[in-house]
Amino acid sequence: MSKKYKSIHSIFTKSIIIIALSIIIVMSYTLYYGFSQVSRDNALQNTKEIITQVNYRLKGYITTICEISDFTNEVDFINDKENTKEKLQTIINSRHDIVTIAIFNNLGELIISSDNEPTLSENEIIRQQWFYSVIIKKEGDYNKFFSSPHIQHIVKNKYPWVITYSKKISYIDENGNNQDGILMIDMNFSLISEMIRSATLGTSGYLFIIDEKGNVIYHPKQTLIYAGLFEEDKESIDNEVFGTFVNEHNNRERLTVIQTINDSKWRLVGIVYIDEVLSGVQSILVLVVILAIIFSIIAIILAWFSTKLITSPIKQLEHEMAEIEIETSKLPKAIEGSKEVNSLSLAYIEMIKRIRTLMRDIVTAQDLKRKSELEALEAKINPHFLYNTLDSVVWMAEQNETEDVITMVQALSKLFRVSVSKGHEIITIEEELEHVRNYLLIQKMRYQNFDFSINIKEDLKYCPIIKLLIQPIVENSIYHGIKYLVDPGIINIDVYSFDDKNIYIKVEDNGVGMDEKTANLLLSSYEENNESISSGNGIGIINVQERLQLTYGKDYGLSIETELDEGTKIYIKIPKNEAIYQLKVANKDTNI
Amino acid sequence: MNKINFKYIIILLLYILILTGCNNKAFLNKDSNEPKKIAFISMKQGGQLWGNIKNGARMAHEETNCLLDFYEPIEETDSFTQIKYLEEAAKGDFDVIIINPCDFTLLSTTIQKVQRQGATVLQIYNETIAYDGFQQFKMMTNFSPVGDAIADFVISNTHNQHLNALIVGSLLHTSAGSQTEMGIKQNFKNNNDIDFETVYCFGDSERAKKLVSEKLNKDDTINFIIALDETSSTGITEALNDREDNSKIKVLAWGNTLSNITGLENGSVDGIVAINGFGLGYRSIYAALDLIDNKVFPSTELDFAIVTKETFLNSRNQRLLFPQLL
């Protein structure tokens, strides 16, 4: 299976597209991560700022509560009960965030309260977390306590959700003894939660407060948490204690920022959902992706056209080369385009020109070679015959057969005239037959034992033929056919044609004939017939065959019909061409 | 399409995929779904329990961004209005209808009918009669454990005295009432020394008050009154308030109404059955959304507690009695 080569245009286009698209992808990703990082950093910064603000507010609030609680340092609320109660009432009236302020002794007995309503029993009081958490503290401990949100049931028929601040205090009782007591301030939970809820972190981000044990003080989903329907990621928050981290909770990635709130042991936690943070980036990135796709399409189109621009002259050159293969005479055109392709094109034109020159030289050389070969073949005929004829003339002169000498010398003269033919290779059939006739005449005078006839149609007389074709065949008939007969032999030469294409010359003798092997040897080439050539047997026929096929091609040549003791027929097939003018070499003396 | 073109299309698609991959959230996380529509047919307007259930549903609605329409008959006995609302909701393009059926017989036929018409109905708190081949979606409708817990509470609070209990229910044909009553009865059957009687006020607290007064006047051995719902509870506390001496009678009220809580505080009520209505409403919305998505919603038992004066300060009980913090 042959390898399928890709076009240079295809390779260039694909390469450019791959590079361009890779760059676009890398840029898109870089842009995405750049935007994401910036957004995350901004979100972190914003969250920190918001948390710091809320923290500051809460810290201020807690400081205020602590300051309020400090009134116990100055007031003698045992001996000046009415005045103290009035003060507490003033605080309650001016601060909607405070529900109740009360002071209890160590046994849970109420000493003074901002509320007029009766309170719960001592037993119920001391069971409350805000009470016992402070009472068990030792001196030097952090003596303040902030409770989790709870229903404050200290006042009958009132059930507010409060966060209780409690603090261990000292006071002097009616007897002048120093006593420990507990100050309790109930803070309205709804007002505290409102303070935090007003700070928003995105659409679904939120802030919440937990105490040192991880109990939720405030959470926007506190109702759900209390109903067991939502769980905060306490584990991660407890592990981190303080700082910033990103983790996944309930299948959503979120950023958590934790800060501590001074004076309370509370921690303020801000949660920001990353998908919300990136939502702004997402919309920008949608645009980026759309642009990336548009740029990709443009890149593909540009890659296509730019490579087309580069490769088009190359393709044109390739086309020109292909045309030269088909139309060999055409000279390729110079290709415009890049400098390199233009140079290539000009070099190619030069190369074609040189090749053609070289080819012409080769053809000329080949022609010359063939001509010299033909001349060499023709030259092989003459020495044989001339020697034998002159030998016969000498012999006849010695016998004083003057007439015969004259006839033979005249015939020889005509024979050579045709042979020379003024240097022409092509003569008329008439002239060729004249040449044969002279040859047969000479041979008849020499051997006396055969007769001959030559027949030709009038319209074939002036058809062209390469000279000296028939004589070697006739010679072969004499020397290898008739010569061995006891009776006189006959040689008939007929020239005829069946159509307008071919002419057939038949040389027939009634000699001894030959076997099939010999006949085949006569029709084979020089190279295959070295043995025959070396022995001089049939060399004339082989020459004729070579010359015929060199001149007219493989469709033309000799064919032999022979039978031992019966005779031989040799056919010469030549093309029937337009009649040519006779050279009149044979007409100088027509008396023969 | 020849092989080469197909190859190029695949490469192009892969390229777009890679390109959008960096940004998949922007393309894929677009919530293309229309908000789900849920109809919520309550048993009645007002009432602490139904208020809590609605609040829970509202909270879930805010979280899920679904569309939530409430349908509320004025009276809890008004089964015909419930049927009308159910048919109306079925004709509307609600994805799910959540209903608290007030009559397990009458509503059953209509629920079957609308379900056959293609509506999805989720029953909460109460359930209708289940017929063969009729698929019911229900949530927190098993009240037998509540009845059992009530019986345990009652027995443990009679201190080896002979128990003569009066059970006061509101509606005869609600599964919650029936199952609770059955739970109590099953538990009481194990003890031969218990007398009890059940009466129904049919959604009328005045009638409950009258029934309780009559029963107490007729039988002075009644030493425990059990409410099976808020309406009955109101009637019971009002009936007892009219009497001079209730020291021998213990009361187990139902629901986190203010009168029950103050009753618990002043000692006129010995215990309150507190149901986590907020959780029920909240979970019902998520269950409805699961139904829309052809998911199986988690099976959840009813969250309840019997709160006494001693356990009132317990943080869990506080949250059950006062589910709304703000």
Image (tube, grey):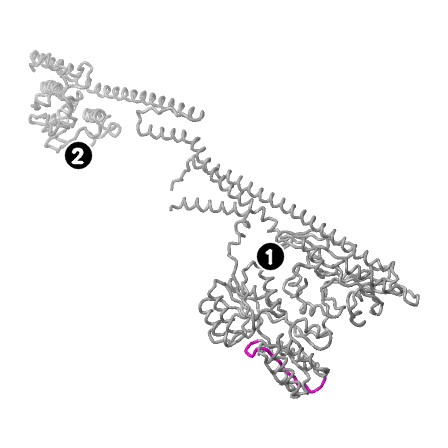
Q: Is residue A1 above or below residue B80?
A: above
The image quarter containing residue A143 is bottom right
Q: On screen, A562 above or below A472?
A: below
Front: mark 1 or 2: 1
- The residue under label 2 is A516
Q: Quadrant of the N terminus of chain A?
A: top left
Among numbered discs 1 and 2, the one appearing first in the sequence: 1
- Give the residue number, with chain letter if any, for mark 1: A251
Q: Residue A317 appears at what percent x and percent y?
A: 38, 28
Residue A452 lies in quadrant: top left
Q: Position of residue A281 (x, y in %)?
A: 58, 46
Tell me the CA gap for discs 1 and 2. Answer: 105 Å
Image spot of residue B171 (x, y percent):
57, 77
Q: Residue at x 36, y 28 (%)?
A: A320
Q: Position of residue B33 (x, y in %)?
A: 51, 56
Q: Which residues are magenta?
A: B159-175
The residue closer to the viewer here, B324 or A342, is B324
| Badge 2 amino acid | Glu
* Of residues A59 and A225, the one drawn nearer to the viewer in this rendering: A59
Magenta-drawn stretch contains A368? no
Check if residue B161 falls in the magenta segment.
Answer: yes
- Mark 1 belongs to which subunit? A
